[in-house]
């Protein structure tokens, strides 16, 4: 690798609303390598990738392409420079055909030029053949599986002869067969001399595919390593600074009666025949790949999108949960996965956010009592150590971890007996994560039943008494803590059937 | 700059109202037409303006945007507040303005209905100035169309809206004369349709008439929008020889059709004279030279002797004016 | 709250709280109030007949029906929806009232039927939006045409009147020199401001408008609230229609034509955020008076209707731009 | 699957086919009640009712495809119409075509203003155009001094556009309208810029990431809508022979929106074809002509427009839901 790097990044920093999320990153990307970017959520790897792709502009720092300084001001410039970013859930134009999606945004012909429909479709077909996938390029994007949409994105990168292709967690929603196809194509592209940035959480994939890996932590580049030289343990250590298990001190709790029991829960197109139970004082993990239906099951139990069939028992009695308020009345609480959309009221005050679930408490006689509200909020701020400037400032001004604490505080006020936590530590600083682990442990110790959905296996393995695994909308394993390892979980999480348009498309 | 307190404002307006009542000041007249941008009322306004030049009265016009029932109300209140001496109004509704008009009258303002009356609510205005005796309009139109078609054949009416009071009065009179007058025994009214005084709907309705009644000989459209739309339709269809059209239309609106023979003649009155008469009457009443009593008479230059009729109604002319190719260029309104 | 927060460097925990003066002063209602004062001064200078409390109160009765509905519309817009059909609902419910009364129904029953019509129309809007999940802005454009059309089919373009004397002229009944409809408006303003500011329902309306999904997850009965608000719009429109019928002593299908523009204008001028989640009854209350001042001021100064149309249209756009700018400043 | 069944199923899945079937059914039903409906003369009347709606519908369709809406077209139409009328009246020496071009340009300018306000301040177009609906109507009164332009000033040759025909008895304005539709089709389906409008409406978030210049494109769409509304204003003057500032184009936006949504254009953007819109306009034109022939009061027109908008929304929604459900089912079944 004696040549000048394809991309040389120097001192790249990025601030959002005064918060520095990336600081002083220096990184060289060579031609013809597959380079992994690793790190926890919020570590800065995605921000860095987006800066390369022109989605964000760096606050400071310079980029050079083949030794020439360049400014990547927007995605179009990036495209022109031969840089393509492939999102996990590809951004597409659902109403337009695959072939059109491939050429949209190309700047190689005049805006008032004709659309060469026939050539365009032939070119698209050729690309698909080249990639070895069978996708009808005249069909609208709307009907494509995510894997196929990714293929279309890769085809688009090829069509514009991109030299750097950035794949942001491409494998999370894919079946193993699809992952295989993707890897094959990625290697072929590398062999053609292209550079691929591969962002993933799955270390085994990094080991299987990548040449080098760069690890980010807390917005800074920690190290760049040759993958063959390091073990998974080394990488984890670099990612979190210290072994995860050290963060988690689970106090043993008394496991009691069954608190929540679901049986035969089904929702066509999402999940089917889900049955499990969670006992008082028990932490039950729910693992699975993205798109396996974990969140859908949680939403169904909580009444956000009730299941079509199946029964739910709370404390042994069958219940009907038609909407979340029913669930709350039964002592359930739900911390949703997508905090920014489903959790916080971004522009409302921290106070209003925290008391949102307990209207009866703050307004005992129908009118809101400022005194009670203040007291409740103050209690939460103290109990959960929420760091803020004022309880009346908009919650959107807080950091992710503190927002998440406020969401949890909201539920603690309802004194829930059953908590469903969906990726509660996603995008949270490592220090705050530890606080959360403590809290979850304490909640269980208090005799509450906890269903913990997480994609971070070490987290599940450390916290849970039992781990359920879902794949393709079905429950595939129910493992005791003693039996659970990363391997057993992944084995159950990987789909057995290949559900893929590549096979079904005629 | 904030020089007027509310109190001062009140006393000031009171002073202005009482001041206006002294005859030294010129009489101030405001005219509120149905809506703005209606060419018919431009001509009426001109009548007011010319009369006021003559009589030394102050004239202003204030028009709402739409002819909706309530749109004139804020204008009446505002003019009452301004302390004008006379409010002349072409009412958009025969009954929605009763209370505001009463309020105006209680402040000593003379309220005149011009060009249309507050039918059945006569006690809410002082007098009405109408162009002609409306009972004569219907028969006049029947006679005109009859003369064009040789008093024989099918005729139809294209009106404004189903409940337009003036048009309905006229149509009733048409039906009556067709039935009772033996001269019209061979004329047959086959349909009455409504174009809502909208160009598009009127056009569609007129087209439907030609389509539905292939033997149609004549159309009467007693509304300016309708007659213009019908003329356009007949011109387009090239049926000027087969279907004779007449109705109430302004010379400016109908000039091209009369000149090219699409329409032989239409009728109307002079809106200008309405403005003239209203101004003369208003100034006369305010100055005490005219008594607003049924049966009283007074002179208006160019209009001759005007008699105040039943319900304090006066007319500017006895008969409709007929506009045809010979005389249409003498009129500009 | 504390004002002695340390001014620390931007951290990853939270941004600083805004200073108190900003919280109090940089809000759209302040803009509305400033405009109100400005408009009053300009109107007083344009015409010596303007600054007369009795006159302004009397003139306000021509807009107060819209103002009352605009108050409820404020809640609808804060909840993240919009209703463009209230003027048409006024007309249809008033036409139902008048037609039934004319058909011989006792006037009390006719009024109840009118209110029931309002409920049904609001419910229809609400069901289309809440159950069928259609965008309210376009749904209510459809129902605006539909309701107005039904009013026309029902009443033709007759003026239906001849109500008993006690029913007519509510705007001329004064309590302490203030017309009854204005008092109704003030009472409803206070009541809705209280509901919005101090009750759980009010709080939840803001929350629903800020994030519908977050509200669902927090157990707020979003559909019930929205359906309720649309029904409230129907009822308010029906009340507005009846007040108008009483003021005019007659009803025609074209009642309040184009009134939706004025109502939306009142809400926007009052600083309610078009995308929901922010706004206040106080703002709409002030904006209602602002509109009365502007319209009355221009009319009494004999300013042509031309200018009035332009001013109204421009005000709507400017007020949204200003409100957006203010919220963008305070949002970060 | 045989070729015929395949053909039929494509037909049934195309929105256009559904509208075409409705057009035929309507013709048959109305014709059965009133046989005169099925004559060449009726065809001529319907043809004449179409151009006004069709030309403006082309503009509105582009706006809807871009995920916006333009409520101000009625006022823009009136503005262009009155500008042309005033030029005909006060500047008789200026060639007619110049006045027409000026009027269309005025329409474009007002549309441009809509686009600028919408994009610059990121406001919902529906509220902005509700404001300009009033604002532009005020301008119409302002420039015309609230005075009508009388028929005598409208050039004979312009009026003859609605009356005379170059071929097969089809009036000029009808031919013009279909030429505009054809051009719109070509632009939207075969020009890269036109495809970008679909992309913008299909995914406004992704559009800038793909290098689509959202601001200029949105402004362009509104400008085209304005210019087409302006052209509609000229057709209006031609068809009705005079221009009144108070009644020209009032409520026109609802007619056009109704026609466009019947044609299958989605208010959610990204979906809609010129063919569908043309059929939607024809269907609405037929209804308008059929009502008076059947002796139905014109009062029903608004009820029909309103119902049509609501029903079209529901159909659009159910189509979307069904395809989403089918997709989910297909995924879970596999």
Image (cartoon, rainbow, N blue to C red):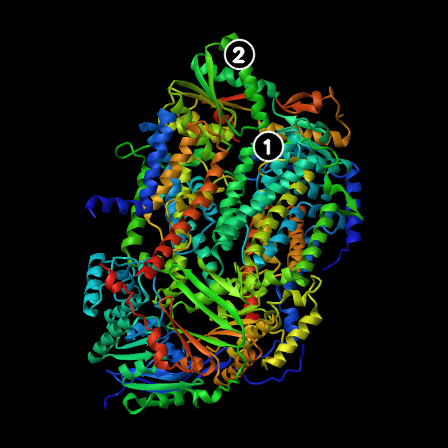
Q: Nearer the viewer, mark 1 or mark 2?
A: 2
Give A385 or C144, whichever is nearer the viewer.
Answer: A385
Q: Is residue B256 visible?
A: no
Front position in the image: B58 or A66 = A66
Q: Earlier in the sequence, mark 1 or mark 2?
A: 1
The residue pinned by badge 1 equals: B44
Quadrant, the N terminus of chain B: bottom right
Answer left or right for A292 relative to B72: left
Which secondary structure lies at badge 2? helix
Label 1 crowd bin: few (<14), some (14–19), many (20+), radius 10 Å: many
- Do tags 1 and 2 sit on the same chain? yes
Res. A192 image quadrant: bottom left
The image quadrant of residue C4 is: bottom right
Q: Residue furthest top?
A: B182
> Residue at 33% of width from left, 76% of height from top?
A491
Q: Up-down: is B333 above or below C197? A: above
Q: CA distance from mark 1 to mark 2?
A: 35 Å
User: Residue C317 has which mark?
Assistant: none
Front residue of this view, candidates C33 and A320: A320
Circle 1 marks a residue in which chain?
Answer: B
Return the x and y of residue B291 as percentages of the image width and height.
76, 25
Image location (x, y in percent) of residue C50: 71, 50
In the rendered view, tell whether residue D164 sits above or below residue D177.
above
Residue that mark 2 sits on:
B179
Residue A245 percent across, percent down from the top left: 45, 87
Chain of the residue on which disc 2 is drawn: B
Helix, strand or loop status at disc 1:
helix
Is A328 rendered above or below residue B91? below
């Amino acid at each position: 690798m004696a040549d000048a790097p394809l991309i040389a990044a120097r001192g790249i920093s990025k601030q959002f609303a005064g918060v520095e999320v990336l600081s002083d990153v220096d990184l060289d990307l060579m031609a013809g390598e597959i380079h992994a970017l690793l790190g926890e959520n919020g570590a800065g790897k995605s921000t860095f990738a987006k800066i390369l792709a022109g989605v964000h502009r760096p606050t400071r720092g310079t980029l050079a392409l083949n030794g020439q300084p360049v400014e990547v001001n927007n995605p179009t410039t990036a495209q022109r420079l031969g840089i393509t970013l492939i999102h996990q859930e590809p951004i597409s134009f659902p109403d337009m055909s695959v072939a059109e999606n491939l050429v949209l945004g190309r700047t190689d012909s005049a805006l008032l030029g004709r659309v060469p429909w026939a050539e365009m479709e032939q070119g698209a077909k050729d690309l698909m053949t080249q990639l070895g996938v069978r996708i009808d390029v005249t069909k609208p994007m709307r009907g494509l599986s995510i894997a196929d949409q990714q293929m279309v994105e890769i085809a688009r990168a090829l069509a514009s002869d991109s030299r750097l292709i950035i794949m942001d967690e491409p494998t999370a929603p894919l079946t193993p067969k699809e992952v295989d196809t993707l890897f094959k194509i990625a290697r072929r592209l590398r062999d053609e001399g292209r550079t691929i940035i591969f962002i993933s959480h799955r270390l085994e994939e990094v080991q299987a595919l990548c040449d080098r890996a760069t690890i980010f932590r807390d917005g800074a580049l920690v190290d760049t390593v040759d993958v063959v030289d390091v073990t998974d343990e080394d990488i984890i250590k670099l990612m979190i600074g210290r072994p995860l298990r050290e963060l988690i001190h689970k106090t043993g709790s008394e496991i009691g009666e069954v608190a929540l029991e679901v049986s035969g829960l089904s929702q066509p197109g999402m999940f089917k025949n889900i049955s499990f139970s969670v006992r008082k004082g028990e932490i039950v993990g729910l693992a699975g790949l993205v798109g396996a239906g974990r969140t859908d099951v949680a939403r169904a139990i909580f009444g956000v999108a009730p299941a079509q069939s199946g029964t739910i028992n709370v404390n042994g009695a069958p219940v009907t949960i038609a909407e979340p308020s029913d669930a709350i009345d039964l002592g359930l609480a739900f911390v949703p996965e997508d905090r920014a959309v489903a959790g916080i009221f971004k522009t409302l005050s921290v106070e209003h956010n925290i008391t949102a679930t307990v209207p009866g408490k703050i307004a005992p006689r129908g009118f809101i009592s400022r005194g009670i509200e203040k007291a409740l909020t103050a209690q939460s701020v103290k109990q959960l150590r929420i760091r803020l400037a004022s309880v009346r400032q908009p919650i959107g001004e807080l950091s992710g971890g503190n927002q998440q604490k406020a969401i949890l505080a909201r539920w603690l006020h309802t004194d829930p007996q059953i908590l469903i936590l969906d990726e509660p530590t996603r995008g949270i600083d490592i220090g705050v994560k530890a606080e959360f682990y403590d809290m979850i442990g304490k909640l269980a110790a208090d005799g509450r039943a906890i269903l913990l959905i997480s994609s971070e296996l070490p987290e599940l393995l450390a916290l849970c008494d039992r781990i359920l695994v879902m794949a393709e909308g079905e429950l595939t394993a129910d493992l005791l803590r003693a039996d659970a390892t990363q391997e057993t979980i992944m084995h159950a999480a990987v789909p057995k059937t290949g559900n893929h348009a590549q096979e079904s498309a005629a | 700059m904030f020089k007027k307190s509310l109190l001062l404002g009140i006393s000031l307006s009171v002073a202005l109202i009482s001041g206006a009542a002294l005859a030294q000041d010129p009489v101030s007249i405001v005219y509120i037409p149905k809506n703005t941008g209606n060419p018919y009322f431009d001509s009426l306004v001109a009548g007011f303006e010319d009369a006021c030049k003559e009589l030394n009265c102050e004239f202003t016009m204030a028009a709402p945007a739409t002819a909706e029932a309530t749109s004139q109300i804020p204008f009446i209140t505002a003019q009452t507040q301004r302390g004008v001496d006379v409010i002349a109004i072409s009412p958009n509704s025969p009954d929605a303005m009763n209370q505001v008009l009463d309020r105006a009258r209680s402040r000593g303002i003379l309220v005149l209905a011009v060009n249309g009356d507050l039918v059945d609510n006569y006690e809410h205005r002082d007098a009405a100035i109408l162009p002609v005796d409306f009972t004569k309009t219907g028969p006049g139109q029947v006679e005109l169309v009859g003369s064009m078609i040789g008093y024989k054949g099918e005729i139809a009416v294209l009106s404004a809206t189903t409940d337009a009071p003036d048009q309905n009065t006229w149509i009733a009179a048409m039906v009556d004369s067709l039935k009772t007058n033996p001269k019209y025994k061979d004329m047959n009214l086959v349909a009455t349709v409504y174009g809502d005084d909208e160009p598009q709907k009127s056009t569609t309705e007129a087209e439907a008439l030609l389509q539905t009644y292939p033997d149609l000989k004549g159309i009467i459209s007693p509304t300016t929008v309708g007659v213009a739309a019908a003329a356009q339709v007949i011109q387009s269809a090239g049926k000027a020889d087969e279907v004779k059209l007449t109705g109430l239309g302004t010379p400016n609106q109908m000039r091209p059709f009369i000149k090219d023979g699409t329409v032989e003649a239409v009728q109307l009155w002079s809106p200008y004279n309405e403005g003239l008469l209203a101004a003369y009457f208003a100034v006369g009443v305010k100055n005490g030279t005219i008594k607003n009593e049924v049966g009283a008479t007074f002179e208006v230059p160019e209009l001759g002797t005007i008699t105040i009729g039943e319900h304090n109604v006066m007319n500017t002319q006895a008969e409709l004016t007929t506009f045809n190719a010979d005389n249409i260029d003498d009129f500009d309104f | 709250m504390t004002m002695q927060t340390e001014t620390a460097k931007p951290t990853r925990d939270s941004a600083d709280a805004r200073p108190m003066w900003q919280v109090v002063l940089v809000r759209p209602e302040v803009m509305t109030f400033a405009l109100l004062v400005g408009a009053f001064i300009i109107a007083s200078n344009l015409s010596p007949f303007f600054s007369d409390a009795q006159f302004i109160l009397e003139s306000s009765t021509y807009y107060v029906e819209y103002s009352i509905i605009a108050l409820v519309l404020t809640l609808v817009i804060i909840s993240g929806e919009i209703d463009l059909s209230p003027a048409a609902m006024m007309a249809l419910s008033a036409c139902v009232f008048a037609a039934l009364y004319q058909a011989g129904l006792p006037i009390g029953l006719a009024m109840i039927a009118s209110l029931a019509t309002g409920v049904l129309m609001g419910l229809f809007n609400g069901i289309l939006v809440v159950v069928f999940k259609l965008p309210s802005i376009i749904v209510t454009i459809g129902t605006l045409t539909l309701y107005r059309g039904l009013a026309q089919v029902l009443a033709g373009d007759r003026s239906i009147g001849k109500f008993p004397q006690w029913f007519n002229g509510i705007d001329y009944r004064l309590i302490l020199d203030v017309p009854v409809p204005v008092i109704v408006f003030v009472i409803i303003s206070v009541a809705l401001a209280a509901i919005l500011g101090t009750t759980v329902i009010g709080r939840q309306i803001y929350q629903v408008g800020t994030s519908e999904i977050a509200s669902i997850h927090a157990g707020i009965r979003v559909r019930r609230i929205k359906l309720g608000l649309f029904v409230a719009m129907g009822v308010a429109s029906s009340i507005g229609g009846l007040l108008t019928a009483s003021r005019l002593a007659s009803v025609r299908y074209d009642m309040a034509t184009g009134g939706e523009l004025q109502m939306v204008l009142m809400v926007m001028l009052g600083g309610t955020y078009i995308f929901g989640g922010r706004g206040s009854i106080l703002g709409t209350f002030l904006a209602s008076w602002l509109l009365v001042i502007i319209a009355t001021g221009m009319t009494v100064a004999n300013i042509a209707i031309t200018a009035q149309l332009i001013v109204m249209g421009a005000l709507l756009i400017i007020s949204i731009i200003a409100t957006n700018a203010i919220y963008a400043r305070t949002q970060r | 699957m045989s070729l015929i069944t395949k053909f039929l199923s494509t037909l049934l899945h195309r929105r256009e086919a559904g509208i075409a079937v409705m057009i035929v059914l309507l013709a048959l039903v109305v014709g059965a009640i009133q046989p005169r409906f099925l004559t060449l003369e009726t065809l001529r009347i319907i043809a004449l009712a179409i151009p006004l709606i069709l030309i403006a519908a082309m503009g509105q369709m582009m706006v809807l495809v871009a995920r916006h809406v333009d409520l101000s077209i009625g006022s823009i139409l009136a503005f262009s119409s009155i500008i042309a009328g005033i030029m005909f009246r006060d500047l008789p020496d200026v060639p007619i075509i110049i006045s027409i071009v000026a009027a269309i340009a005025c329409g474009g300018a007002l549309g441009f203003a809509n686009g600028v306000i919408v994009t610059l301040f990121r406001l919902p177009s529906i509220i902005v155009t509700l404001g300009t609906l009033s604002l532009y109507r005020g301008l119409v009164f302002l420039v015309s001094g609230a005075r009508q332009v009388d028929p005598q000033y409208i050039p004979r040759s312009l009026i003859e556009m609605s009356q005379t025909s170059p071929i097969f008895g089809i009036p000029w304005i009808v031919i013009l309208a279909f030429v505009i539709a054809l051009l719109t089709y070509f632009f939207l389906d075969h020009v890269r810029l036109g495809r970008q409008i679909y992309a913008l409406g299909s995914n406004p978030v992704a559009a800038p990431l793909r290098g689509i210049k959202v601001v200029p494109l949105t402004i362009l769409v509104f400008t085209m809508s304005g210019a087409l509304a302006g052209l509609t204003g000229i057709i209006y003057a031609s068809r009705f022979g005079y221009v009144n500032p108070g009644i020209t184009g009032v409520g026109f936006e609802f007619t056009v929106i109704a026609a466009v949504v019947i044609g299958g254009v989605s208010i959610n953007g990204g979906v809609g074809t010129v063919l569908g819109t043309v059929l939607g306009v024809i269907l609405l034109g037929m209804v308008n002509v059929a009502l008076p022939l059947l002796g139905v009061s014109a009062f029903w027109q608004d009820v029909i427009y309103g119902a049509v908008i609501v029903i079209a929304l529901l159909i659009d929604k159910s189509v979307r839901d069904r395809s989403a459900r089918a997709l989910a089912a297909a995924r879970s079944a596999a």
